[in-house]
Image (cartoon, rainbow, N blue to C red):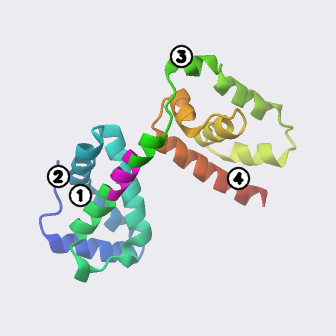
Amino acid sequence: MFHLMTDPKTAEQLIAQIATGNRSALAALFEGESGRLVAIAQRLLRRRDLAEEVVQEAFITVWRQAASFDGSKGSARGWLTVIVRNRALNLLRDSARMDFEDSEKLVELGDRQADARAAYEALSIKDALRHCLGMLDASKREAVLLCYVTGLNHGEAAATMNVPLGTVKSWVRRGTVALQECLS
């Protein structure tokens, strides 16, 4: 693993650049810190895929909130670690409340992916909803349809699509925002 963060000052400088909208600074910070942060998240979550997802979400937070970083309250690396740790703990807490469905239950639900596709295909070509759904990429469209048309919860949709739960949540959230914008 290539480690860019040998100098703690570098992280602070990159965050300052990220606060101005510098995407290459975000990429450099990710390159230098993601390995360490995934290891921290993986120790808490005990799953590499969830740890990587938490780190990805943390860097989205960094992109959005870089301007709020205050070096007088701690180091940039400490700030990143706290963001990742809090996201991992939130995921653990939320997962404890979530009902996961076993594969037998999913079989009982039938082929919801086919139901979702059929509902989409049943919309008139002239229908604004069909047009807006067509503007979404296939994964987001399928996640939205599975949750809103067939009634699956996010966990069931994730299992049906064979992707991580957070990915489905993200697709549904982004998909519904895009639909609202398109339909307004």
Query: Which marked residue is nearer to the observer: mark 2 or mark 3?
Result: 3
Q: Which amino acid type is shown beneath numbered disc 3? A: Glu
40 left or right of 90 in image: left
User: Circle 3 — which element?
Assistant: helix
User: Circle 2 — which element?
Assistant: loop
Q: Which amino acid type is shown beneath numbered disc 2? A: Phe
Which residue is situated farthest in the front direction here? 97
User: Circle 4 — which element?
Assistant: helix
Residue drawn at (49%, 31%) of the image: 100
Residue stretch rendered in magenta on the structure: 86-92
Residue drawn at (41%, 66%) of the image: 63
User: Circle 1 — which element?
Assistant: helix
Tag shown at residue 2: 2
Tag shown at residue 33: 1
Earlier-in-chain disc, 2 versus 3: 2
Kindly report the distance in space between the C-alpha atoms of the residues bearing marks 4 and 3: 33 Å
Tag shown at residue 104: 3
Earlier-in-chain disc, 1 versus 4: 1
Q: Looking at the picture, does residue 152 appear above or below residue 90?
A: above
Label 3, residues with CA under 10 Å away: few <14, some 14-19, many ≥20:
few
Tag shown at residue 179: 4
The image quarter containing residue 92 is top left
- Of 45 and 98, which appears nearest the observer? 98
Q: Which amino acid type is shown beneath numbered disc 1? A: Glu
Earlier-in-chain disc, 4 versus 3: 3
Kindly report the distance in space between the C-alpha atoms of the residues bearing marks 2 and 3: 44 Å
Earlier-in-chain disc, 4 versus 2: 2
150 left or right of 97 in image: right
Q: Which amino acid type is shown beneath numbered disc 4? A: Leu
